[in-house]
Image (tube, rainbow, N blue to C red):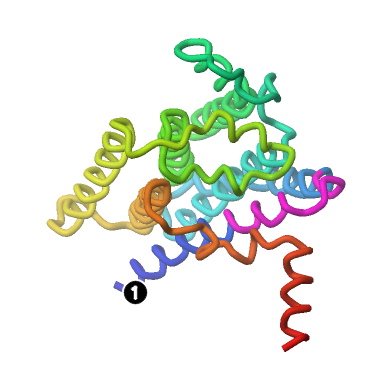
Amino acid sequence: MSDTVLAAGYAALCWWFGTGIILWLDRLPPRSFRWSLSGWSILLLLSFWAVAESMKSSSVSNAYLGFGSVIVMWGWHELAFLTGWLTGPRKTALQPGVTGFVRFKQSLDVILHHELALIFNFIALWVMQRDQPNHVALCTFALLWCMRVSGKLNLYFGVPRNGAQYLPKHLKYLASYFPTNGVTPWFVISFGASLAVWVWIIGQAQLGVVEATTGWVLLATLLGLGILEHAMMVLPWPIERLWGWALRTKNETVLDNATLDSK
């Protein structure tokens, strides 16, 4: 039980802190982006080396190494996107009144380069995985990718809480691509399917059909956290409750300190 709690806690910490540090870096002055991306690019290279090492054997330590390395790898893609460095060929708001294929094409164009980078990254991991016994890293990246595609489609079709208010200034044009709607059929399908898979795999472990290895716990926890992110699209639970420290700007901190000094 202690090993299970440790693995679940590690996955949750990687998810929470990894997301938070990206949000924090993206809210620094734009002149800092080149340094943030340069530093994270070094981490990206190290993560590829660490993933290659983790794939060589199915040990507990390699499960942690592969999972954590992919979180770092995924963080590079997130930072590259949120700083505006790797988005797509279209960098303007959605054309008013467009529907159907035109809207889909414009929506794809704003994220196309980022999506291609993710595909190339997955292919690289797939090639690295050949004849290697430990699949935790590849499965972690695949799971993050699937949940991200599901999330993007939910934003495309519309959700009650699309998070547009958290977009940095240089990406405010993306808000025009996120309609604010009620719960759509796609949300019901994507959320229901993800939850059903999660409940099923937990049940399989409880019945002893599958072994709850460290890698399995890491992936099951990550899927549960992805489901939580989907739920936050419809529930009145602002992300400040999880990442308030990362979303605070320098001006907000100064104002808060001034308020405290005046009391």
Q: Does the magenta stretch include residue 76?
A: no
- Which residue occupies the extreme left position in the image? 207
Q: Which residue is drawn at 33% across and 66% down?
A: 4
Q: In which quarter of the image is the C terminus?
A: bottom right
Residue 238 visible in this rendered orientation of the protein:
yes
**Image height of 142 relative to 23, above or below:** above
- 116 vs 174, nearest the viewer: 174
Q: Residue at x 30, y 41 (%)?
A: 191
Residue indicated by mark 1: 2
Q: In this view, does 29 lie to the left or right of 177?
A: right
- 132 vs 214, nearest the viewer: 214
Numbered range of the magenta stretch: 19-33
Residue 142 visible in this rendered orientation of the protein:
no
Q: Which residue is drawn at 35% across and 53% down?
A: 224
Where in the figure is residue 86, as x and y percent of width and height?
Answer: 70, 31
Q: How crowded is mark 1: few (under 14 residues within 10 Å), some or many (20 or more)?
A: few
- Which residue occupies the extreme right position in the image? 31
- Which residue occupies the extreme top position in the image? 101
Label 1 sits on a secondary structure element that is helix
Where in the figure is residue 161, as x and y percent of width and height?
Answer: 45, 46
Q: In which quarter of the image is the N terminus?
A: bottom left
Q: In this view, does 195 lie to the left or right of 221?
A: left
Q: In this view, does 214 lie to the left or right of 82?
A: left
Q: Is residue 79 left or right of residue 38?
A: left
> In which quarter of the view is residue 244 placed?
bottom right
Q: Which residue is drawn at 64% across and 61% down?
A: 246
- 75 vs 187, nearest the viewer: 187
Q: How many marks?
A: 1
